[in-house]
Structures are given as C-alpha cells and as structure tokens.
Image: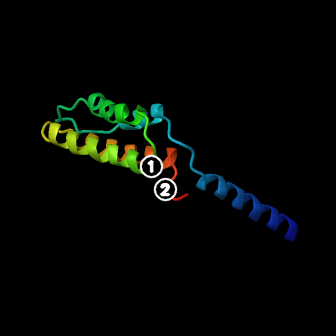
Amino acid sequence: MRTLSLCALLTVLAATAGCLATTPLTISEFRGNCYQTSTGRFSDCDSIQVCEAYATMLEAEVANQESCMAGCQKSYAILTRQYAYGGCGPVVDAGNDWCVRFCRTNYPPSGK
C-alpha cells in the first residue's frame, strides 16, 4: 500500500513538473491565438491585419527579451492609435498579451 501511494505521488509530481515547463511559442501559435480574439458582433475590425502587425515585429531579429518586449510595447502604442475606433481594442490588447508571451517564452530574461 505504501509503495502504491509513493508511486502515485511520484506520478503526480512528474506530471506537475511537465505542466510547469514552458515551451517557446511559435509564430504560428501566436497567429492562431491572436486571430481567434473575439471583437463582438458590432465591431468593424480586421483582426488579421492587427495580428500581422505584431507578427511582423516578432519575426524580426531581436537581441533579447527586453528588446522583444519593447517591440511589443511600440506595436501596441501604434495599433492603439490606429485602431482606437471600430471595435479592435480587444484584438490589440490580446495581440499585445500574446506578443509578450512570445517574448517571454523565446528569450531568456537578461542576467540569466
């Protein structure tokens, strides 16, 4: 009985460790998640165009996580001004969230 409990505990710990590991987000995954952002039925938003603006920045070579995050911030500022009206706010916000996630999973923080 004790061996069975120990095996069950080890299995749970191994599964939890696997869940905590973060794999790099691919540009295809970024696009897929960004494109799916709901904007509401009354909005006039071209989510693909918004997401592609972020994707273009992410596909450019960057040196580190900080420069990638700065690119997300710059893209967010531009897109917020460009798409302030028309119901694209949720896509701009979600694109920024996915952009930051891409940076965090693809580049180690500085100093590490």
Within the image, what quadrant is residue 23 found in? top right
Is 94 displayed left or right of 46 in the figure?
right
User: Disc 2 marks which residue?
Assistant: 110
User: Residue farthest to the left?
Assistant: 85
Q: CA distance from mark 1 to mark 2?
A: 7 Å
Within the image, what quadrant is residue 68 found in? top left
Within the image, what quadrant is residue 53 found in? top left
For the N terminus, give its image quadrant.
Answer: bottom right
Residue 46, x across and y down, in percent? 24, 29
For the C terminus, give its image quadrant.
Answer: bottom right
User: Who is closer to the viewer here, 55 or 36?
Assistant: 55
Which residue occupies 21% across, 40% down? Answer: 78
Amino acid under label 1?
Gln
Query: Pointer 1 and pointer 2: residues touching (CB < 8 Å)?
Result: yes
Residue 86, x across and y down, in percent? 14, 36
User: Disc 1 marks which residue?
Assistant: 65
Residue 22, x across and y down, in percent? 56, 49
Which residue occupies 40% across, 33% down? Answer: 60
Above/below status of 76 relative to 4: above
First of labels 1, 2 by sequence position: 1
Which residue occupies 68% across, 55% down? Answer: 15
User: Residue farthest to the bottom?
Assistant: 2
